[in-house]
Image (spheres, rainbow, N blue to C red):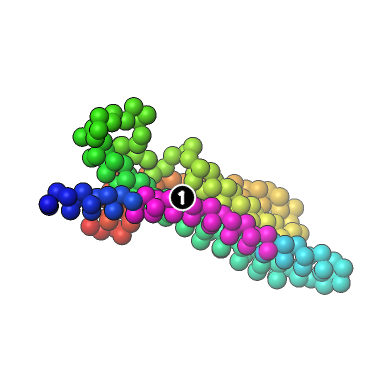
């Protein structure tokens, strides 16, 4: 009777965690859709103000800079959310793999798992450069870098070095974001879920 209850618990836990895993995976696409809408709205507003300023002969540089700065700060927040979401996704996926392995090791009904469906509780890695989630992270970091470069370009539009400043700052920020994000993910590898998510057991 006790074993039956444990099986029911693991079955329910597996189903709930599998749904949670899909939720975290889909959440990345929801984040990127929200970001795309916000970027289009804010950057469009900045460009619209620039065009309006030329037409009316007025300087809206400060308002444009504030608009781009809001888009940039939003982008940084979304970037951090994507990194954090990857941590949640990996822990839940590893747990799902562990439960699946527990059952399949018994070869129920002679099932041998010839398709090699995921059973490794050490997979997936927190950082996998080929994963779709990583591609979203790359795109977000690039957009944030370009926004930062644009802000500096507008600030130093009268300088002879405006292009060097814009391109250099864009490149540096992209590399900095990716370096911090990747290091953060890699350092989660040997930690428990509690340590990784909450910083303590």
Q: Nearer the viewer, residue 141 or 119?
A: 119
Quadrant the C terminus occupies: bottom left
Q: How many marks?
A: 1
User: Is residue 18 positioned above or below 103 on the image?
Assistant: below
For the point 18% across and 53% down, which residue is it?
A: 5
Circle 1 Cα neighbour tier, 10 Å, few/some/many (<14 / 14–19 / ≥20): some
For the point 85% across and 66% down, which residue is it?
A: 54
Whether residue 50 is visible: yes
Q: Quadrant of residue 124?
A: top left
Q: Look at mark 1 in the image and give the residue it sits on.
A: 25
User: Is residue 19 positioned above or below 71 on the image?
Assistant: above
Q: Is residue 105 left or right of residue 171?
A: left
User: Is residue 182 positioned above or below 82 on the image?
Assistant: above
Q: What element carries label 1?
A: helix
Q: In this view, does 38 lie to the left or right of 119?
A: right
Magenta stretch, main secondary structure class: helix
For the point 29% across and 58% down, which residue is it?
A: 199
Q: Residue furthest top?
A: 114
Q: Give the range drawn in magenta.
A: 16-41
Q: Residue 64: x and y, percent?
A: 71, 67
- Residue 51 shown in magenta: no
Q: Residue 99: x and y, percent?
A: 27, 44
Q: Residue furthest left?
A: 1
Q: Residue 172: x and y, percent?
A: 56, 48
Q: In this view, does 150 lie to the left or right of 172?
A: right
Whether residue 169 is visible: no
For the point 67% across and 64% down, which residue is it?
A: 42
Q: Residue 101: x and y, percent?
A: 26, 38
């Amino acid at each position: 009777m006790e074993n039956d209850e444990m099986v029911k618990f693991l079955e329910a836990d597996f189903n709930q965690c599998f749904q949670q895993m899909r939720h975290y995976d889909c959440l990345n696409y929801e984040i990127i859709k929200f970001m795309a809408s916000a970027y289009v709205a804010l950057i469009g507003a900045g460009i619209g103000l620039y065009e309006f300023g030329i037409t009316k002969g007025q300087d809206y540089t400060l308002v444009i800079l504030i608009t781009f700065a809001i888009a940039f700060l939003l982008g940084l927040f979304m970037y951090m959310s994507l990194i954090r979401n990857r941590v949640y996704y990996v822990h839940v996926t590893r747990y799902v793999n562990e439960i699946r392995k527990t059952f399949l090791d018994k070869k129920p009904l002679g099932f041998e798992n010839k398709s090699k469906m995921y059973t490794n509780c050490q997979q997936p890695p927190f950082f996998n450069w080929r994963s779709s989630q990583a591609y979203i992270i790359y795109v977000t970091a690039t957009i944030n870098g370009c926004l930062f470069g644009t802000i500096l370009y507008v600030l130093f539009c009268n300088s002879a070095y405006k292009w060097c400043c814009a391109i250099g700052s864009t490149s540096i920020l992209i590399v900095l974001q990716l370096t911090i994000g990747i290091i953060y993910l890699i350092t989660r590898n040997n930690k428990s879920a509690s340590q990784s998510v909450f910083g303590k057991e």
